[in-house]
Image: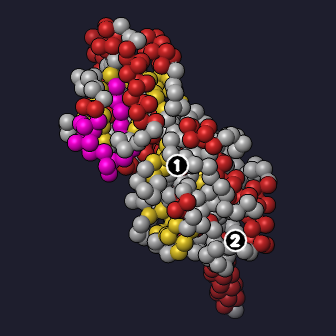
Amino acid sequence: MTIFRRYKVAQYLLWGLAIGVFSLALQAIVKKGEAGGISDYRIGTMAKVGPGTLTPFYPPSPQEAQIPMSVFWMDRLPVTQSDYLKFLTEHPKWRRDRVSPLFADSQYLGAWRAPLQLGDGMKPTQPVTQVSWFAAKAYCEAQGKRLPTENEWEFAAAASETAPDGRYDTAWRQRVLAWYERPTAQVLPEVGKSAANYWGIYDLHGLIWEWVLDFNSTMVSADPRESGDAEKTKFCGAGSLTATDKDDYASFMRTAFRSSLEATYTTRSLGFRCAADVEVRGAK
Amino acid sequence: MSIGVWMWMVAMAGTGSASAASIYDLKITLQDQSTQSVPLSVFEGHPVIVSLFYGSCQYSCPLLMSAVQKVESTLSPAMKSKVRVLLISIDPVRDQPPQLAALAARYKLDLTRWKLATTSEDNVRDIAAVVGLKYRKLPGGDYNHSQVIAVLNDKGDIAARFEGPNPETAKIAATLLEL
C-alpha cells in the first residue's frame, strides 16, 4: 500500500514537472514571437520595392518631375543596435575607439557604455543611431548591400499602409507629420513596432532619420528669399527649386535635414537601413 | 632591454595611419591625365590644393582653374615648387585621361606639380564627402554642384576649406604659407 502511494506521488510529481517545463518552453517561444512584433528571422530581411514612379518633393530639374523607379530591395527594418555591434566585432576598425576621425565625429556611438557595449537601458532591437555616413556605408557594404539612394528611400517612404503613393491619404499624412512635430524620444522605440507599409517595410516614418547614399546631392540655399542670381553662383548649374507639394511638410523637413548633413555627422536620431539591386539573404 | 624598447618605439611610429584625420585614410586609386594610376596620397609630403570639377563645366570650373593659378602666382618660387595641385573630376563618364590631358594643355598646367584625375563614381562620392562638396548629376549629363577648395598639409589633413565660386585667393595663399 505505502509503496503504491509513493509511486503515485512520484508519478504526479513527474507530471507536474513535465507540465511546468512544457509551459515554460511554450512561454519562451511565444515571447520570442512577441518581441517587437518582429521575430528575429525578419531582422535583416529585405522587401522588394517598385517598380513605379517617384514624384520628388524638390525635382532637381524640370525633366525630373517624375522619376521612373525600377525594382530594388530594401531592408524591412532599420539596422539595430545588436546588428551594429555584431558588425563591430567583425570589423574592429569601425569601433569608436579605433575609427579614423575622417570617417566619424567625436559623438560616434557616444551613448554606448564602451566600444563594444550598448548604453544603459539600450535594447538590442532599437535602431542604431549616432553613426556617420561612412560608418553606415561600411556596414551595408559588409552585408553585400549598400545605402539606399535618396530616390529609393523617398519612393519607399511615399507608400502608406495600403498604397504605393499615400499622398492623398490625409489621415496617413497627418500621422507622418505628427512625428516630425514631436521632439526625439528620449528612449528610442524598438524597430518594427508599427504597421508595415505597402511594400512590407517598417519604420520609414515615426522612428529615426535615415542616411541615404547620395545625401550630398541635396543642395538647398539657406535663405529661400535669395535672388536667382545668388543661387546660380552658389551652386553651379542650379536653377531655383520649387516644391511640388507645398502641403508635404514632412518631405520639406527631410530635404532640409539632409542638406544640413556632412558625412562625419552623427546624431541620436539619425540611423540607417540598407538596400540592394537584388535581394541579399542570409544571416547578418 | 632598452634597445628592445627603443626598437619597439621606432616600429610603432611607422605603423599608424598617415595622420589622425588625413584624407589619405581613404584608400583610393585615381587615374591621372597621362593614364597613370596613382593613389589619392600621391602628393603626400607636400602641401596640396585639392578640388573637384568636371571638364564640360562652363561656369565655375574655369573659375576654379584661374583661382588656383592666381594663388600660385602670389607664391615665392621656393614655396610654389613645394605646392601640389590635385583636381578630381566628378564626371568619370566623360572625363577620361584624354579629356583631362586636353584640359591640362588648354590651361597650360604645370604637370610636374598638377594632376587632373578621374576615378570611380563611388570613389568620387567618398572624396566629395570628405572635402564637403555637394553635387548632383542632371539628366543632360551636366552637374549641379557647389565649389570647394581644400588645402591639405603634408600629412593630408585638411588645413582649411574655401567655399563658393570666388574664393579669396589671398587667404588660400596665406594658409599655404602657414603650413
Indicate the quadrant where residue A117 lies. Answer: top right
The residue indicated by pointer 2 is A167
Q: Chain of mark 1?
A: A
> Which image quadrant: the N terminus of chain B?
top left
- Left or right: residue A207 compared with residue A279: right
Residue visible at 62% across and 57% down in the picture: A58
Question: Mark 1 packing: few (<14 Cα in 10 Å), some, or many (20+)?
Answer: many
- Residue A155 on image: x %, y %: 57, 67
| Secondary structure type for disc 2 | loop
Alpha carbon of mark 1 to alpha carbon of mark 2: how far? 24 Å
Question: Percent x, y for residue A230?
Answer: 62, 37
In front: B103, or A252? B103
Above or below for A218 versus A99: below
Which mark is first along the chain, 2 or 1?
A: 2
Q: Are marks 1 and 2 on the same chain?
A: yes
Residue A123 is drawn in which quadrant?
A: bottom right
Q: Which quadrant does the C terminus of chain B fall into?
A: top left
Q: Taking B98 as reference, is A204 above or below it?
A: below
Label for residue A9?
none
Q: Which residue is mark 1?
A: A217
Q: Position of residue A13 (x, y in %)?
A: 67, 81
Q: Which residues are magenta?
A: B85-104
Residue at (26, 23) in percent of width and height = B110
Given residues A58 and A129, the one toward you in this image is A58
